[in-house]
């Protein structure tokens, strides 16, 4: 599989840690030292479809292809503005990819990675030729802005990649899920009208709609599962950690990234970070970083990269890719 083009987009409005300190009991020192996040972009009414379409248009321009040559759009998100029509279909209309089959995929922060692996399977089978995979999230719509333990962590944004078949460039993946532990990270449900008119059910609404997280459990899961699945994918690809040029990891917490570097005995120079600018953008975090690294010249043809992500579900995965 070969990356033909990438694109990313984040909303214009930037919310700093100091801005958040005016609405909840927090401060820049706590947020920066515990997470590495300094600011995040927050949508002012733009939907996941709008963010995703803007990122997709940039990827199409970068790939220099006609939107009509896109055969499949896989949209990874757990924050669709509507469940019907699906976000991928809304994006199809906005970008004019009228020959594409379109569907959404929800694997929370692992969504883009699962989308990449789905794309690879289709390309290997010969079913499609050009596949657009997008991660797009409006996390701000599912955040409880009075809960300091979660509202400081997330941001909105979208990233996209266009993939095509290439027998010369290997793609190897491992992935997994654990529904038994899913309760440590929940939210993003649809509010039913009945709930809104019945005050007895207000707590149910809050519990299902807003993100709730047992941060320490998610942290423990991430620092053990990410190195484990990276080791698995390295073994499957017949590579060692030193063979890899860059590790493009889900951007949730800089302490998780440092811990992964230590456990794998790799230099943090090989693990680019941009979460200080965007916070955790869930399914969008890996493609936004991928796009930035391609555009600033860090990633070059011939390199070997690892992607790895983890998130709600619980879900996780790692992919080895020759670019
Ligand atoms: O994409 C997957 C998504 N999730 C993650 O990757 C999250 C993984 N987990 C984490 O990144 C960390 O667990 C957090 C950053 C969420 C929290 O860091 P922590 O070191 O685990 O802090 P904690 O939850 O143990 O809280 C420590 C203290 C508590 O106060 P007390 O009980 O010690 O008095 C919290 O109430 O920090 C307090 N606290 C805050 N203080 C200031 C929690 N949130 C804040 C805040 N500002 N925003």
Image (cartoon, rainbow, N blue to C red):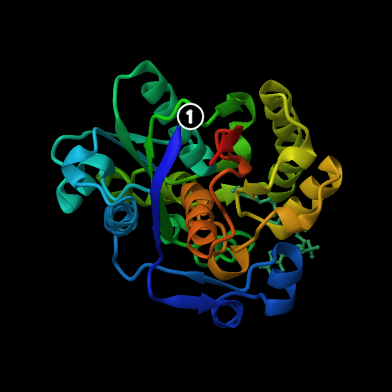
- Say if residue 78 shows up in the picture: no
Pick the residue in front: 200 or 66.
Answer: 66
Pick the residue in front: 184 or 94.
Answer: 94
- The image position of residue 321, as x and y in percent, is 57, 36
- Say if residue 182 shows up in the picture: yes
Q: Quadrant of residue 33?
A: bottom right
**The image quadrant in which ligand 1 is located:** bottom right
* Secondary structure at numbered mark 1: helix
Q: 314 above or below 255? A: above
Q: Which residue is mark 1?
A: 117
The residue sitting at 24% across, 33% down in the picture is 71
The residue sitting at 62% across, 68% down in the picture is 276
Residue 44 vs residue 228: left or right?
left
- The image position of residue 165, as x and y in percent, is 39, 29
Query: Which residue appears farthest toward the top when viewing the image?
Result: 125
Q: 238 above or below 291? A: above
Q: Quadrant of residue 55?
A: bottom left
């Amino acid at each position: 599989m070969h990356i033909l083009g990438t694109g990313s987009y984040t909303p214009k409005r930037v919310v700093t840690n100091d801005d958040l300190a005016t609405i909840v009991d927090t401060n820049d020192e706590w947020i920066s030292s515990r997470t590495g996040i300094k600011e995040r972009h927050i949508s002012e009414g733009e939907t996941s479809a709008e963010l995703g379409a803007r990122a997709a248009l940039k990827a199409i321009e970068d790939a220099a292809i006609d939107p009509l040559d896109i055969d499949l759009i896989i949209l990874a998100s757990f924050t669709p503005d509507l469940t019907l029509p699906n976000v991928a279909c809304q994006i199809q209309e906005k970008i004019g990819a009228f020959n594409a089959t379109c569907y959404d995929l929800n694997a929370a922060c692992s969504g883009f990675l699962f989308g990449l692996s789905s794309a690879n399977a289709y390309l290997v089978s010969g079913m499609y030729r050009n596949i657009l995979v997008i991660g797009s999230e409006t996390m701000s719509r599912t955040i409880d802005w009075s809960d300091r333990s979660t509202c400081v962590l997330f941001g909105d944004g979208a990233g996209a990649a266009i993939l095509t078949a290439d027998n010369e460039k290997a793609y190897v993946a491992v992935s997994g899920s654990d529904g038994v532990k899913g309760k440590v990270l929940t939210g993003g449900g649809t509010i039913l009208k009945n709930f809104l008119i019945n005050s007895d059910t207000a707590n149910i609404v809050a519990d299902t709609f807003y993100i709730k997280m047992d941060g320490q459990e998610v942290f423990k899961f991430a620092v053990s599962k990410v190195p484990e699945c990276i080791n698995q994918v390295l073994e499957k690809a017949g590579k060692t950690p030193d063979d890899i040029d860059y590790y493009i990891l889900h951007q949730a917490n800089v302490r998780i990234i440092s811990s992964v570097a230590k456990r794998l005995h790799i230099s943090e120079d090989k693990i680019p970070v941009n979460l200080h600018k965007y916070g955790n953008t869930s399914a969008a975090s890996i493609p936004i970083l991928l796009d930035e690294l391609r555009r600033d010249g860090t990633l070059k043809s011939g390199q070997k990269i690892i992607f790895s992500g983890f998130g709600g579900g619980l879900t996780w995965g790692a992919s080895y890719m020759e670019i």
